[in-house]
Image (spheres, coloured by chain):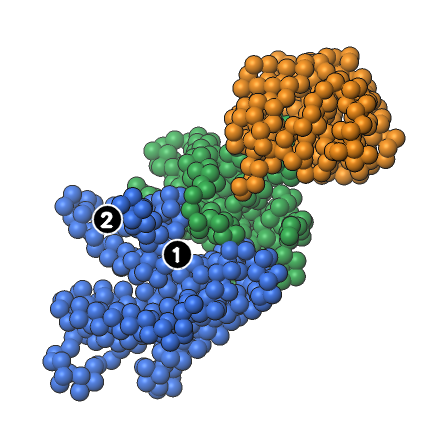
Chain colours: A orange, B green, C blue
Amino acid sequence: MLEIKDLVTEFASVQALSGVSFTAATGKITTVIGANGAGKSTLLRTISGLERATRGQILWNGLDVTKLSVEAIVRSGISQVPEGHAVISQLSVAENIELGALFRKRKARADVAKSIAEVYELFPILFERKSQMAGALSGGERQMLAISRALVARPNLLLLDEPSLGLAPLIAEQIINAINELCRSTGLTVLLVEQNANTALSVADHGVLLALGKVVAQMPAAQMIADESLRAAYLGY
Amino acid sequence: MTQFITAFFSGSSHGAIYALVSMGLVLVWRGAGVVNFAQMGQAMFTTYIASQLIMHKYSYWIAFVIALSAGAILGSIVDFGIMRPLSGRKKSAILASESMRTTIPVIASLGVLGILKALAGIIWAGEERGFPSPVSTNGIKFGTSTLAFTAFDLFVIGIVLITLLLTTLFFTKTGMGLAMRASALNPEVTRLSGVRIKSVRTLSWAISGAASSLAGLLITPSTNLSPNTLDLLLIVGFTAAVIGGLTSLVGSVIGGFAIGYVISFVNVYSSPENVFLAILLFLLLMLFLRPQGIFGTKEVRRV
Amino acid sequence: MFSIKRIWTKSLFVSLLFLLGLFALGKTVGAYNQSQLASVATLFIGVLSVTLLTGASGQISLGQGAIMAVGGYAAALLVLNLGLSMWLAFILAIVIAAVAGLLLGLAAARLTGPYLAGTTLVIALAIPTLANRFESTLGGDVGLSVDVGNPPAWLGKLLGEIGIEQWQLFVAIPFSALALFSVINLSRSRTGRVWRAIRDNEVAASLHGLNVARNKVIAFVCASGLAGLAGALYGFRGIVGPSVYPIDLSLALLTGAVIGGLRSITGALVGTVFIVFLPDLIGKVTGVFKVSEQVSNYLPALVSGVLLLLTIVINPAGIAAATSQIAKHRHRTK
C-alpha cells in the first residue's frame, strides 16, 4: 500500500505540490487526474525520486522512501514510466528491455528471462521488432516499450505518467487495457496519472483529483465518474 | 616509395596509440561529461610505477598488468575523490554561471595533472629515463632488406586491436557495457531502470585510466619517460577525439589513426618542426567545419 | 548608477596608490626582492589577463603564456631589428598581441569549456615551436637577448644609484599600474557588464540582444593586449625565448588567478604574489627540514596543484571570495 502524507515539493520557491495526502491500495489501480499544471507529473517524479520532496512522507508498504535515491527506490519495487514514451532511441528494443532488468540480482536470472518473455507476450509487436532501434518505433510501440522496461524490473508498484499522451485513442485504449489486465492478473499496484479522465476512471478502482498541487477529492472511481459537479468544476466537461 | 611505407607504418603504430588516448578521453566525456586533461599525467605516473618494477627485476608483463590496474585505480580515485564532490557542490555563486560549470572540471583536472607531475618528480626525479619494450625495436628483416617497421610496431598495433575488440565486446555484449551506453545516452531513463549511475561513471574513469596507462606503456619506449614527456600525447589525443567526435568511441579510434597518419606524413614529407602547426591546423579546420567531429552527434541546445 | 567620472576617479586613485606603494617598497628592499617585486608587477598584468578573460567573460584559455610570448618576441624584434625605443616597443607589443588575440578570439568564439581549453592548449604548445621554425629571425631555442638597458641619467641624479633590478622594477611599475587602471575601468564599464551577462548565460544574453560573439572576441583582444604587455616586460629581463614562456607559465597564471579569486582584481594580485613568492617560501621551509633537492625542486609545483584543487573543490571563487564571505558573515552575526 502506498501512503502519501502531506507531500510538498518546491521548485525555486514555487510549490508544485502543496501538501498532498492520499492512499493507493495494494493490487488496485489508483488514478490521479486533474488539469494541466495540477502537479500530477511532479507527484510521480517525487515518488520515484527524480524530484526531491521538500516536506512530507512517502511510505511504501511501511517503508519510508521519501529520501531514497532513484536507484534505491527502483530496487524497493517501485518503477516509473515517465511522460512521453521515454525510451533510449539509440538502443534496440531488446536492449531497452534488458536495461530494465540489469539491476536484478544474478540469482534471479531465470526469472529475468521469464519476465522478458512475459512482456513480449503482453506486447507481441515488440518481439517482432526486437532488433530494431527504439527510435524507429511508432509512438504507441515506444510507449509499450517504455512500459515493458519498467515491468521487467518486477515492480510491486507501477507509476504511469500520462501513458496515452500523443497516442491515437485506439492505441491508448489498448495500452490502458493491457495495464488493467496486468493489474488484475498479477496483483500489481498501479498509480496512473492521466489527462484523459474518462479512460482512466473507467479502469481504475480509486480516483484522486488534483488541483493546484492539492488533493481536492478522492473517492472510488465509479463515484467520481458519476459526480457531475466535480467534472464540471475541475475537468471542464 | 619507401618514404610512403615508412610514413604509413609509423602512422599506423603511433595512430594506434593515439586511438587509445582518444578513446580514454571520449569514455570519460561520455560517462562523466568531463574532458580529463590529467589523463596523460595518470599514464605517466603508472608508467613510472611499471618502470620501477622493471628496474627491480620484475618481468615486463607483471609490470604491464600492475600498471594497467594502477591506471584503473587512479582513475577511480580521481572520480571518487575529486569529481564527485565537485558535482555535488551547490553553494558557491560562481557555479550559477553556465560557462563556469564547464570550466571548473577542466581546471580541476589541470590541478590533478600538476599534482601528478610534481609527485612523479619528487618520488622518481625529473631526469629522463628509458623504458623497455618486450619485443625487438629493430627493423624487421624482409629478405635482404630491413623494413622501417619493427616487431614493436606490430606489437603495438596488435595490442591496440585486441583492446578495441575487447572494448567493443564489453559495450555490446555485457550488462555493464549496456548500462554505460545507456547512461551516456539518457541518464534519466537509466536511473529509472535502477542503474547506479555514479558507479557507472566511476567505471568509465577506471576503464579510461587503464586505457591511458596502456598508451603510456606503449609510447614511452620511443619517447623516454619523464614527468613532462606525455604532455604532447594529450593534445594529440585531444585533437584525435575532436576529429572523431567527442561523443563517439568509434570516431575516437578513427580520429586517432587519422591524426597518426597526418603526423607521420608531415614528419616524413615535410619536417618535424611543422608537426605542431599541422596538428593545430587540423584541429582548427575540424572545429570550424564540423565541430561535432566526423562521427559525433550535434548537441542540441535547449533554449 | 556610478557616474563615469566617479569610476575613473576611483580607479585612478587605486592605481596611483598601487604605483606609489610598489615604488616605495622597491626603494626599501634589497636587489633580490626588487627582482621579485618586478616579477610581481609584471606577472600581475598576466594574471589580470586571465581574470579578465576567464573570470569576467567566462572563457578559459590555457594559452596566455603563448600570447605573452607573442608580446615578448614582438617587443624584442622591434628593439633589435628596428631600433625602436623600449617604451615604444612595449606599447606596440600590446597592439600586436591584441591582434593575435583577435585571431584567437575569432577562432574561440564558437568554442566552449573543454573544446576551448584544449584548443588553446594546442596553440600554447604550437606557438613556441615557431621559434625553431623561423630560427634565423626568432633565434630558435636560444632566443633573443634583450634587456631594459640602463636607467636614464636624470633619474640617477634624482634617486642616487639605481641597480639593474631596481630599474627593472621601475620600468614595470607604471605599466602595471596602467594595466590595473584599465582593468578596473573595463570591469565597471558597460562592456564589463556585458561580459558578465555572457559568462552567466549566453543564450539569455543573446536573447537580450547582446552580440555574444563580438563581445567574446573583444574580451580576447583586451586580455591578449594585457598578456602581450606582460610578456614584453617579462622577456626584457634578459631573454625572449621558448624556454621563457613554457606551458607551465600559462598554467601558473591560471593557478594564480583561480587561487586568488577568478572574479576579483584584488584576487589577481593575491594570486600573483602567491606564484612569485611560493618557491622561496617553500625553500625556506624545506631548508629547515633538510629536504633533498629532488623534493624541493618539485614541492612548489605540488603545493600549487594541491591548492588549486582545494580552491576549485571547496570554494571555486578563490581566496578573495572566501574572505569577503567571511567578512559578510561576521557583519551579519554582529
What x and y, as percent, mark residue C73?
39, 74
Q: Residue furthest front?
A: A229
What x and y, as percent, mark residue C60?
47, 58
Q: Residues within 10 Å of mark 1 (few under 14, many from 20)?
A: many
Q: Is residue C61 above or below residue A95?
A: below
What amino acid is at disc 2?
Ser
Label 2: which residue?
C296
Residue B79 left/right relative to A2: left
Could you tell me which quadrant the C terminus of chain A lies in? top right
Residue positioned 74% across, 12% down in the render? A186
Identify the secondary structure beneath mark 2.
helix
The foreground one among C64 and A52 is: A52
- Which chain letter matches label 1? C
Residue B28, visible in the rendered structure: no
Identify the secondary structure beneath mark 1.
loop
What amino acid is at disc 1?
Leu
Q: Residues within 10 Å of mark 2 (few under 14, many from 20)?
A: many
Residue positioned 60% across, 19% down in the render? A3
- Which chain letter matches label 2? C
Q: Is residue B262 above or below residue A93?
A: below
What x and y, as percent, mark residue C120?
49, 60
**Figure quadrant of residue C69:** bottom left
Check whether the beta carbons of the residues at disc 2 and disc 1 lie within 8 A of each other.
no
Q: Earlier in the sequence, mark 2 or mark 1?
A: 1
What x and y, as percent, mark residue B90?
46, 42
* Mark number displayed over residue C262: 1
